[in-house]
Amino acid sequence: MKRQLATLIALSLAAMTLVGCSETKTDEAKPEASATGSVESTPASTNKVVDGVFCNAEGKPICPVMNSVVESEADAVEVIEHEGVKYYICCAGCPDKFKADPAKYAIKL
């Protein structure tokens, strides 16, 4: 029973990761749940560079592909520097997408 539960959890987490990274960036940021459980949405056009890091309007680092908050460099699966700006990448599928077309995801300075 424990083995089946562990397998189910592992498969569910893998599926969520794959689904999350298969989405494409839109003009609107995806809603993010805060620590209090509330959901906030910020237009991608309000993204900016704060201390050399790509951030949302609140100054939190975000993945340029998924527009999702990455709390710290330690939480990022990769940090990519492009034209002097650091981009914190949220999940395994995003680095390849960013590297394939950085102009699509990078902020225009």
Image: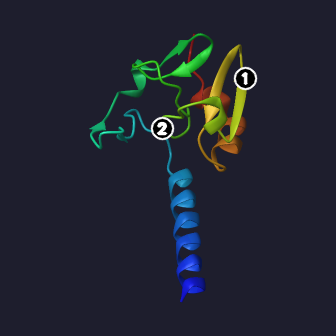
Discs 2, 1 touching: Cβ within 8 Å? no
* Left or right, 26 with reference to 89: left
Q: Position of residue 19 (x, y in %)?
A: 51, 59
Task: Report the front residue among 55 and 99.
Answer: 55
**Residue behind mark 1:** 81
In this view, which residue lies farthest toward the bottom?
1
Q: Residues within 10 Å of mark 1 (few under 14, many from 20)?
A: some
The residue shown at (71%, 13%) is: 84
Crowd class of label 2 (few under 14; some 14 to 19; many from 20; radius 10 Å): many
Determine the image quadrant of residue 29.
Answer: top left
**Distance between the Cα atoms at labels 2 and 1?**
18 Å
Q: Secondary structure at mark 1?
A: strand
Between 22 and 2, the residue placed more toward the observer is: 2
Q: Earlier in the sequence, mark 2 or mark 1?
A: 2
Which residue is disc 2 drawn over?
68
Where does the C terminus fall, quadrant-wise? Answer: top right
